[in-house]
Image (spheres, rainbow, N blue to C red):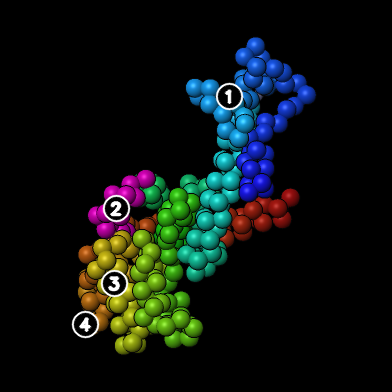
Amino acid sequence: MNSLTDTILKMMDTTQELEDYKGEDGLLYCGKCHKPKEAYFPQGKALFGRDRHPSECDCRRAERERQEKKDADEMHNVEVERLKQEGFSNPDMRQWTFANDNGKYPQIGKAYSYVEKWEMVRSENLGYLLWGNVGSGKSYFAGCIANALMEKEIPVCMTNFATILNNLFYGSENRNEYIIRLCSYPLLILDDFGMERGTEYGLEQVYNVIDSQYISKKPLIATTNLTPEQLRNPEDVPHARIYGRLLEMCVPVRFTGGDFRKVTAQQKMERLKKLMDR
Ligand SMILES: [Zn+2]
């Protein structure tokens, strides 16, 4: 009992700094901000023989708020890190951010508005089908959305079917549980869709993942080298089921223009040529 009283009394102590002083009301004042560091209990009441309790002066409050913000920022960073560790099947995807965008993809505005209007696209279950040739920036676009949402602590899974099939066949996790987990993300992004070779089992799993997302009314973003025309004219029934769902859930966005990977390689080559000409 005594130790409890001691603890409470300790909590009721006010730390006095050198510059602090007693005010006319008998309370301790902060020598820096000149606000009281103590307050009387209301109506002259007392607790454990004390008539006063500690109170925050302006500097103490500012310090507490700074510390609270620092703690919250740290917790936020830990959470974002966890989401990115879990959500990206390839660590390179972490670099595909708005911050790293150098303005070479004209479609990027649509990625910004997707993030801005997330609540709306989430509730209306709207996704994108990003289509176009290799290296036109589709995956980068999708990665920007994923990173930006995760930075708002919204879980996103960005993966591709090669990884999904690999995990289904060789992963340690139960297959059903794995699919349930994949579909637990508010947003699923399937990169390089249509590249997977269609074994019957593989196609069935692909359909299961997309259909689960569809049934739970959650948006899906897919990137593909296939054209909407090819998606509308599938080779067989299993592909038709998959593409049908996809076209139902996703708004097509076309990525045209050159292969930016080639452009970058070309720019490097030209820089090198210039260097050699000197
Ligand atoms: Zn102060």
Ligand 1: image quarter: top right
Give the x, y percent position of residue 202.
Answer: 35, 84
Considering the numbered disc 1 on the image, is that residue within a helix, a strand or a loop? strand
Give the number of the disc on residue 237: 4
Asked if the residue under mark 1 is in contact with the one under mark 3, i.e. CB atoms within 8 Å, the reply is no
Magenta range is 116-128
Can the viewer see residue 105? no
Badge 2 amino acid: Val
Q: Quadrant of residue 213?
A: bottom left
Specify the farthest residue to the bottom. Answer: 200
Q: CA distance from mark 4 to mark 2?
A: 30 Å
Label 4 vs label 1: CA separation? 77 Å
Mark sitting earlier along the chain (2/3)? 2
Residue that mark 1 sits on: 39
> Which circle, 4 or 2, is nearer the viewer?
2
Front of the two marks 3 and 1: 1
Q: Which residue: 21% across, 82% down?
A: 237
Mark 2 lies on a secondary structure that is: helix
**Residue 2 locus on image (x, y percent):** 66, 46
How packed mark 2 is, by other alpha carbons closer than 10 Å (few <14, some 14-19, many 20 or more), is: some
Q: Is residue 84 above or below residue 230?
A: above
Residue 54 position, x and y percent, is 61, 30
Disc nearest the viewer among 4 and 1: 1
Q: Nearer the viewer, residue 58 or 242?
A: 58
Among numbered discs 4 and 1, the one appearing first in the sequence? 1
Residue located at (29% from left, 52% from top): 121
The residue where tag 3 is placed is 212
Amino acid type indicated by mark 4:
Val
